[in-house]
Image (cartoon, rainbow, N blue to C red):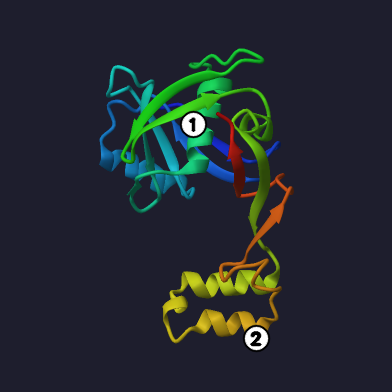
Amino acid sequence: MRRPCYIVDSFAAHALAGNPAGVVLDGADLDAQTMQRISNELKHSETAFPLPAREPTAALHLRWFTPEAEVAFCGHATLATFHVLVEEARRIRVPEGRLTRMAFTCKSGRLNVELSRADFESLLRRHFDEVELYGQRRLQTGRHRLVQRLDVLGLRKRLGVLRRAWRLLGTPPMAEVGLDGIAIERGRLEGATELVAVCRAPRR
């Protein structure tokens, strides 16, 4: 079984950074069980499968699988999919300086997409007067990896072990870092695992 398969680092300008996702093309004849096995083999948090459209006005149908199950939506794997379709497989054309508008369907319903070669902030400012961007990343110090390991072992649900572990390990203030060791920083986007956009004053 041969299919074009890509690993894309979303939210990063170079390889081995950001938030990776798998994208598998030409999967129209694959059943859900096979997609699940492929996703388990790739072992990324999500793998996306862009499929032929199921509605006449949609460009494609999109499915996402974790190594364990299908999910209704995944943001960074969606970005990875459209990157592949535009830049790698060149199945969608996005002219320089222009927007390409289309829609796709998924388990969450029908979603509209605007594709542009402009940077993310410039694109948002087409629709909002006030835009603030935040980068989210997991902390990688030894103490945070320890607590993440405790979480993987299921100790979060046992007697509040994680909450006590954070206090004992002397973490930064909770306003900056959550229990999962996630830092959210304004304006620092390179290498983020997720992007958070706070938009106000929509343009009419």
Q: Quadrant of residue 107?
A: top left
Residue 91 numbered mark, or none: none
Amino acid type of disc 2? Leu
Element assignment for label 2: helix
Q: Nearer the viewer, residue 195 or 92?
A: 195
Q: Quadrant of residue 94?
A: top right
Residue 150: x and y in percent read 52, 75
Residue under label 1: 81
Residue depicted at x 74% and y 47%: 187
Residue depicted at x 29% and y 17%: 56
Element assignment for label 1: helix
Q: Quadrant of residue 95?
A: top right
Residue 110 appears left or right of 156: left
Contact between labelled residues 1 and 2, with CB atoms less than 8 Å apart? no
Q: Nearer the viewer, residue 127 or 203?
A: 203
Residue under label 2: 168
Amino acid type of disc 1? Thr
Residue 112, compared with residue 170, is above or below; it is above
Q: Nearer the viewer, residue 131 or 104?
A: 131
Residue 188, compared with residue 115, is above or below; it is below
